[in-house]
Image (cartoon, rainbow, N blue to C red):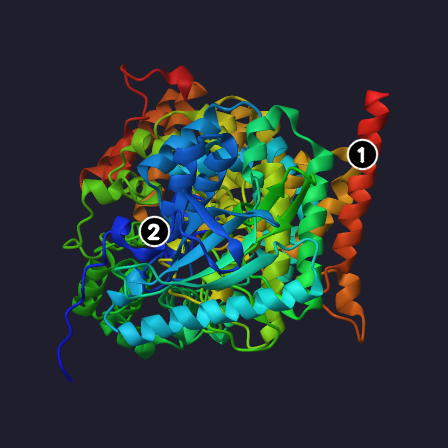
Amino acid sequence: MSAGKPKGDRDVIPRWRNPRHPATRFELDPLRVEGRPVDRTGLREREGDWQANGTLGFALDLVGTAVVLGPSQPAKEAAKLVLETPGTSEVARHASRRVLASPDHEDLRSLSEPTNAEVRAQIHNLRERLRSDPRNAIAWAEAARHYTILGERGKAAGCMRVAVGLMPDHRYVLRAAVRLAVHHGEFDRGHALVARAPRTPTDPWLVATELATAGPAEARPRFVRHGRRMLEDVSFSPRSMSELASALGTFELRGGSQRRARRLIQDSLRAPNDNAIAQGQWLSKQMPSVEIDEILLGESAEARAIRHGAAMESEQALQAAWEWHQDQPFASGPGELGSYHASVAGKFEEGVRIAEASLKANSNEFLLSNNLAFCLLKLDRANEAAKILDDIQTEDLDSDQVPTFLATRGLFEFRVGNPDLGRRHYRTAIQRSRSSNHRILAKINFAVEEYRAGFFEEAMQLIREVLSAARADSDPEVRAWMRRLPSPDNDFQRN
Amino acid sequence: MMAQARLNPVPIEQRPAALLEGESLDGGWVVGPRLQRSRWASGGSYSFGYSVTHPTWGRGFLKALDYSEALASDDVAAALKRLTDSYVYERELLERCSKARLSKVVMPFAHGQVRLPDHQIPVNYLIFEKADGDVREQFALMDAFDQAWVMRVLHNTATGIQQLHGEGIVHQDVKPSNLVTFNHTDTTKLADLGRGEYFGASGPNAEDPIAGDWTYAPPEQLYGFHPADWGIRRRSCDLYHLGSMICFFFLGMATTPALLSRLNEVQYPGQWSDSYDAVLPFIRDAFDDVAAALEQALPGACKDRMSAAFRELCDPEPEKRGHPKAKAARHGDPFSVDRYVSLFNLQVKRAEHLLRSHTE
């Protein structure tokens, strides 16, 4: 066994981002886009006033009107004057940039993943804001998201309770609350929250969430038929239906209906959000006819991480995992996948960084701790690894995790100069592994440690076993790890 | 039913309402030149503005109703009825204000009708006291931003609304271009009752979802939410507009565009098909952003109270607008502006005191 690889199913659990993040935009859309007529008389009047006077007061008035009624050439000229005039307020400048359709650099900066200190500062600002207006459900949800990034689960749950209390039937708030419940492992609570909301039957985004959470909650999904009927309703915009089609497709696939699943997943990719793209990529393993093209792939860091990961293109997978982490900093997936592929690629320092970054919000995730310890040991930082390994609650590990943990323990013992104990751990890990792949991977790492410790005979014996087992195995994962076996081309000091 | 062809409106320069210059009107008024911004629109009705003079009353402002657009519409009778109803309604509102001698509302001098030779359609007009301009002109002097002047304008505006509410009238169109200035008395008044309405009564604009100017409309109106209660629907609108003027003077942007510029475009009123409740959390979040920016911009001495007033007046939920004490009072008026009149008055005194202490 090596560093551990993420496993298990994927569901279309909602993303959770700042509501102003461009990627969230579509999830906030109204279900049906209306082009209601706008009375632009006011705009023409203000344009006349501005052209007659040309001073700042009239420019500001025109810019305000253009924000509400739509831009025009004179309004753009007025917006330029506002931006050129020193001392105009940030609010007026923001509105002017909106009229000029130029990006707001301040906003874009605030959307990138902040440091710990910045997260604390943002929580402080949100708290200040909530003191002035405790009815701001978005600010409560944002405070919950920031506490989640820091791993402060109790505070996050408290803030989210208030947000849901204020807006118990709001799409964004409900989906954020469900995401938090899933993050906390409270699947049944998350499912119940969305299943009982009065808005759910009318909103495909919420129906999708209900279907996606029913599986992890081990509950019967309530809205399968309803969801199917919704998909036939052409009045919904295709983008509103992408997660619903994706969730239904996943449900059908698990129910054994490949044909229906394929059709639904293909439907989900007509105007998808990044979550539906990632789900499509994930399911393409089981349905090779589902293809995610490069353009769609560019829109979802998780989908890229999954694809590069499956192809064992570890450096690309690691890069995509970082992007995925930037987007969903509280999710454990990016750290698990990223640290695994950092280990495969021999980029142990980067493996440490991504595992540590993900552990902030997921301190109890075994795989993150294991992979962090693995990378630390490969960097000969045994003291730090010891603390990580000692903190793992071994009694909570499942039968697949135990061999992984034992192999890492074996690695530790080798690195602290106890090869006998290390051997014992490795052998037990190999014995208890249920997958032949895992046994080969454990032997590869075992062989590396024997070789590194100077036990060449033992190492050669293990290498022979690996080569004999791997000959029949063309698995790209095994082939990738075999590149780490001792060889004349391999710089062993890096292992 | 016979098919009707929609006519093209008569060119502006041939419309009777645009040709009043030089006319002598009943009561001794003489029409001067048409004003530079010569055409106003208010709720679908159009008018032309003129400078007028009177041997006793001096200068005045004449608003001449333009019926040409209505005559070219598909349903001429309905369009004309709407226009004339609006005119008669505004005239009645003004007469009531005139009798009450409201000091902070632009008063009418006269009204009437004139028929030009060669034109069959008469022109209805209203004559008001002539203002020198509106408050937007003061923004040209941004460097010399005068806090005392701003507070005086806010006080005058609140007083104007208070006076109108006292007469049982809502204004519904308070905006910078309707806050007009009078240099000789160094004051400002509230102009244009074209969108006004009697308390609880159904005026010609009663069915309009957006009572006044779209740019300054409270967000619930833009999103098509109409509270059943008349007071919440209409009186809270005046409170919102008053708060919006605080935002305009200190941030240079009225509340509504400041809020909308912080939303995603798909959440804009023209595109949003969902309920107001569904967009409300985002509006409130944007509102808190604007309120925080305002708090930063307000001068230290009035920061707390003025920023609280803004939050109370412009709350995105119309039923929550107003002073907390007025709302809590068992028998009081929940939409009373009395406390804001006092607040702005106090701020005027403080700002003037500060100014004096700086100049001494």
Question: Which tag, 2 or 1, sits closer to the chain's start?
Answer: 2
Element class at badge 2: helix
* Image quadrant where one finds the C terminus of chain B: top right
Q: Which residue is mark 1?
A: B352
Spot occupied by residue A147 in the image (x, y as percentages of width and height): 62, 46
Q: Amino acid at mark 2?
A: Ala
Query: From the viewer's perspective, is B303 left or right of A181?
Result: right
Residue A91 horizontal/vertical position (percent):
54, 37
Residue B140 x %, y %: 55, 29
Looking at the image, which is closer to me, A259 or B321?
B321
Q: Which residue is mark 2?
A: B18
Q: Badge 2 local density, few (<14 within 10 Å), some, or many (20+)?
A: many
Q: Do the residues at discs 2 and 1 belong to one chain?
A: yes
* Element type at mark 1: helix
- Binning the other alpha carbons within 10 Å of mark 1 as few (below 14), some (14 to 19) or many (20 upward) gives some
The residue depicted at 77 percent of the width and 59 percent of the height is: B338
The residue mark sitting in front, 2 or 1, is 2
Which residue is depicted at the point 46% across and 67% down?
Answer: B87
In terms of image quadrants, where is residue B113? Answer: bottom left
- Relative to B48, is A104 above or below? above
Chain ID for label 1? Answer: B
**The disc numbered 2 marks a residue on which chain?**
B
User: Which corner quadrant holds the N terminus of chain B?
Assistant: bottom left
In the displayed structure image, the side of residue A473 where residue A387 appears, left or right: right
Q: Is residue A170 visible?
A: no
Q: Which mark is residue B250?
A: none
Rounded to the nearest whole Å, what is the CA distance between mark 2 and mark 1?
44 Å
- Mark 1 is on which residue type? Glu
Q: Is residue A253 left or right of residue A22?
A: left
Nearest the eye: A174 or A186: A174
**Front residue (pair A271, B93):** B93
Residue B166 percent coordinates (x, y): 71, 67
